[in-house]
Amino acid sequence: MSYNIAMVSDFFFPQPGGVESHIYQVSSKLVDRGHKVVIITHSYGDRTGVRYLANGIKVYYVPFWVVYRESALPTVFSFFPILRQIVLRERIDIVHGHGSLSAFCQEGLLHAKTMGLKTCFTDHSLFGFADAASILTNKLLKFTLSDVDHVICVSHTCKENTVLRAALDPFTVSAIPNALVSKDFRPADVPPPTSTITIVVISRLFPNKGCDLLVATIPRICAQHENVRFIIGGSGPKAIDLEQMIEKNVLQDRVEMLGPIRHEDVRNVMIRGQIYLHASLTEAFGTVIVEAASCGLYVVCTQVGGIPEVLPGEMTVFAKPEEDDLVAATSRAIHAIKSGTVQPEMFHDRIRQMYSWTDVAERTEKVYDGIMRLRSSRLIDRLKRYYGCGVWAGKLFVLCAVIDYLLMMFLEFWWPRRNIDVARDWPRKRVVRKESPSQTDAEGHEERDGWISDIQDQE
């Protein structure tokens, strides 16, 4: 059975990042499996309106104010009219939100449930429980997820964190990891010489990515190892700290700052080195370390969040998120590369077998199958769940849900759905399971990975 799916998030291309890549890759593979996918995000500069990506994926860039780190201004209700227009035009069955800090995601899930649609949420991050920002985020997440049909997390650590933050039933939460397109992250044809060890860092330069650790450890590593140099790619507010560190320690000839890097250029940067250094202080999965290992780099990473679940021990050197331990772990990796005790160029084949976006899409599709069998919630049942979210917060959440329902009634009166044009679907792939795979079937349709696919118009 095929579904019409709307992926909703503040975070999407042209901004680079793990969430953005995840949404695109999963959407592309779901289209390959015969589903229709549209993506709803806010505008990026002059990129507004409707755009088409490869495979017929339609992207709605909604003009909205952006307040912080590409997150739209939370308004609760003003997003509803345009979301309703898109959902009805595209005949959406499932609204799938991405990102705890995405206002579009949180509001989209609320409005989708008000319209009686099935909903799913994917959490890509870890949050604490003590600071004010985390407390507020967790309370809002508890409100949104108390009425979501299913939740997906990118690691088991992320699942445990989300279950605790949002007070969820663990049976309604699945762990489906990220993946990568392995052919786009191949090792260098000629490995770089080990006479000079190059350590690569590609990251958003924010405090949670461990930039302060990098500022402290890079001079010490350079002092201990004369033949080591660094390549740092990425942008963010901590870039100035790294530049000051280079100036203070006179490391201009040993530390190269590349600035922001497009995703398609990541492999070209990684194959210049032998070691990848990941100093993050919190991480739900860490797709970039999988990409680094696939490119044939030995990975040094902090033992935090879901990172220990990502790669086998022989591909990584783990360190505590502390200066001394990170320096020691990096030194062990340098000695291992020099002595030849590890052969990172052999990692690519294992990574290709471990991570596949096709597998992620298949598992996501099973989640969709499950939530489509669920009975739709009545308004009174939704209000009961919201009311249980807290003594004072519960009453506020109930008020929001009631206003949202009244707003939907007004929109149905002011702009009836019969007056909204239905968009014509992109020609969709029909996918049929084959019992005995072969290159082509009797009619000449292409066969890929045990599936037959052809193109047909759906009227």
Image (tube, rainbow, N blue to C red):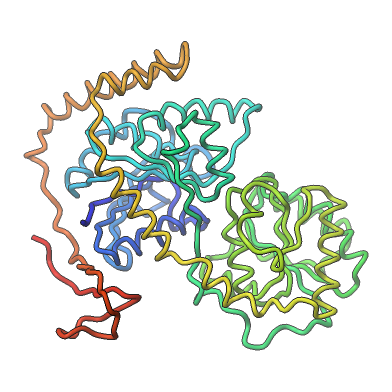
The answer to which quarter of the image holds residue 268 is: bottom right
| Above or below, comparing residue 89 to residue 254 in the picture | above
Residue at the farthest right position: 224
Residue 75: name its quadrant.
top left
**Extreme residue in the bottom direction:** 190
In the rendered image, residue 433, in percent from the top left (x then y), is placed at 25, 69
Q: How many marks?
A: 0
Residue sitting at 32 percent across and 68 percent down? Answer: 54
Q: Residue drawn 90% across and 69% down?
A: 225
The reply, left or right, for residue 201 in relation to residue 329 is left
Q: Nearer the viewer, residue 182 or 258?
A: 182
Task: Write the residue at 42% across / 16% down.
Answer: 394
Q: Quick check: can you spot residue 33?
A: yes
Point 76% across, 62% down: residue = 317
In this view, the residue farthest toward the front is: 435
Task: Judge whether 140 appears above or below 51 on screen.
Answer: above
Residue 111 or residue 10, whichever sits in front: 111
| Whole-percent x, y for residue 123 in the image | 48, 44
Instruction: Find residue 369 and report its horizontal and vertical position in percent.
Output: 28, 49
Left or right: residue 73 versus residue 248 is left
Depth check, front residue: 164 or 326: 164
Quarter-of-image position of residue 266? bottom right
Residue 232 appears in the figure: no
Asked if residue 26 is positioned above or below residue 369 in the image, the reply reads below
| Placement of the C terminus among the 4 image quadrants | bottom left
> Residue 227: horizontal and vertical position, in percent?
87, 75
Q: Quadrant of the N terminus?
A: bottom left
Q: Is residue 36 left or right of residue 20?
A: left
Front residue of this view, candidates 133 and 35: 35
